[in-house]
């Protein structure tokens, strides 16, 4: 997934720890084979290659993530949208070659974007992409799901005290021995909180918009998170941290809330049980 992934586990013997972590990393690699948008051979890219055609049967993992993606898309009124691939490609090019997307390019890409252009068939786990050339991007949800799956694998080895960390996504099971939780620092908790630590267990935390990936044109910063309604990278300097019961939820909501902004974003987060959003806007930047 282009970033380092770290596992922390507590167990009484080293051999179990090593076997369990190897299995968990294998599971993460398997998910990457399915969901990567860099590898043309991934299940996701093979599905996209058949866009415009009939429904295709997909793996349980891919179907599950697509179903959750569509649910977040509907509940966020399209702020979270995995069909943004063609826009994301234009912004990746912008970052790499410093070529700003033209109005024409954005309009062409826009014809391939829209979460309603994805049809899921629950009964046979099929996916139909309605328009030729569509390109799905699971970059805003796959890492959180990988974290959930990695902890499930560790659990199968009897390891219940573990932490997964990959980029801005952290998923935790039970706390370290003798502790009430994993000590997690939220760096962008907003002005009133400055730095804020929380003890978390059996929870996930994701941060988006931490402005490492952006491109500047005419003094304006454009984020790698795209507003699906305009095709433009977000220019609002907003940093969002979500705490939720599962990684798949915290990861996708952090992206969705970044697009929606503070007010609507808080409302979306609150509609998910056991979920909190910390939102920092540029003007309350913590120095
Ligand atoms: P990070 O990649 O830093 O963990 P996010 O979890 O917020 O950050 O995901 C950003 C990624 O999600 C982008 O790199 C892109 O692949 C994808 N993406 C961008 N905009 C959207 C969007 N509006 N809806 C869904 N996915 C998006
Ligand atoms: Mg995210």
Image (spheres, rainbow, N blue to C red):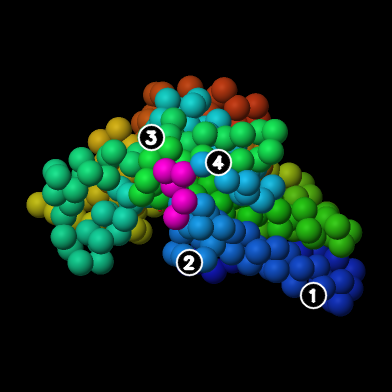
- Does the beta carbon at disc 4 come under 8 Å from ligand 1? no
Circles 4 and 3, Cβ within 8 Å, touching? The answer is: no
Q: Which residue is mark 4?
A: 55
Which residue is disc 2 drawn over? 39
Whether label 3 touches label 2, CB < 8 Å? no
As measured in the structure, the alpha-carbon distance from the residue carrying label 4 to the one carrying label 2 is 22 Å
Residue 137 part of the magenta segment: no
Q: Report the residue at 55% width, 41% height from top.
A: 55
The residue segment tinted magenta is 49-53
- Pinpoint residue 51: horizontal percent, then vertical percent: 44, 47
Residue 15 lies in quadrant:
bottom right
Disc 3, disc 1: CB below 8 Å? Answer: no
Separation of residues labelled 4 and 3 (CA atoms): 17 Å
Q: Nearer the viewer, mark 4 or mark 1?
A: 4
Q: Check if mark 1's residue and mark 2's residue have beta carbons within 8 Å.
A: no
Mark 3–mark 2 Cα distance, whole angstroms, equals 23 Å
> Residue at left 51%, top 52%?
47
Residue 139: % across, % down: 47, 52
Circle 2: element type: loop
Numbered mark located on residue 114 in the image: 3
Can the viewer see residue 247?
A: no
Question: Which SS does the magenta portion mostly show?
Answer: loop
Marks 4 and 3, the one that precedes in the sequence: 4
3D distance between C-alphas at marks 3 and 1: 43 Å
Q: Is mark 2 within 8 Å of ligand 1?
A: no
């Amino acid at each position: 997934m282009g970033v380092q992934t770290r596992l922390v586990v507590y167990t009484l013997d080293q051999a179990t720890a090593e076997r369990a972590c190897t299995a968990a990393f294998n599971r993460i690699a398997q998910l990457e084979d399915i969901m990567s948008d860099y590898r043309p051979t991934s299940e996701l890219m093979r599905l996209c290659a058949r866009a415009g055609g009939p429904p295709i049967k997909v793996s349980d993992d891919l179907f599950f993530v697509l179903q959750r993606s569509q649910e977040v898309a509907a509940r966020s009124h399209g702020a979270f949208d995995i069909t943004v691939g063609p826009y994301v490609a234009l912004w990746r090019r912008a970052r790499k070659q410093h070529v700003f997307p033209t109005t024409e390019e954005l309009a062409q890409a826009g014809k391939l974007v829209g979460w309603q252009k994805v049809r899921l068939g629950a009964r046979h786990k099929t996916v139909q992409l309605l328009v030729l050339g569509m390109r799905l991007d699971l970059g805003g949800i796959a890492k959180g799901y990988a974290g959930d799956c990695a902890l499930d694998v560790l659990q199968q080895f009897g390891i219940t005290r573990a932490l997964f960390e990959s980029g801005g996504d952290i998923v935790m099971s039970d706390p370290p021995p003798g502790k009430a939780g994993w000590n997690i620092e939220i760096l962008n908790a907003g002005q009133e909180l400055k730095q804020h630590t929380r003890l978390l267990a059996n929870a996930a935390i994701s941060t988006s918009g931490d402005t490492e990936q952006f491109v500047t044109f005419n003094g304006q910063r454009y984020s790698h998170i795209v507003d699906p309604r305009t095709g433009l990278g977000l220019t609002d300097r907003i940093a969002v941290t979500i705490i939720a019961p599962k990684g798949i939820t915290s990861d996708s909501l952090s992206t969705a809330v970044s697009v929606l902004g503070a007010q609507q974003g808080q409302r979306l987060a609150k509609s998910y049980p056991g979920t909190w959003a910390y939102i920092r806007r540029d003007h309350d930047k913590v120095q």
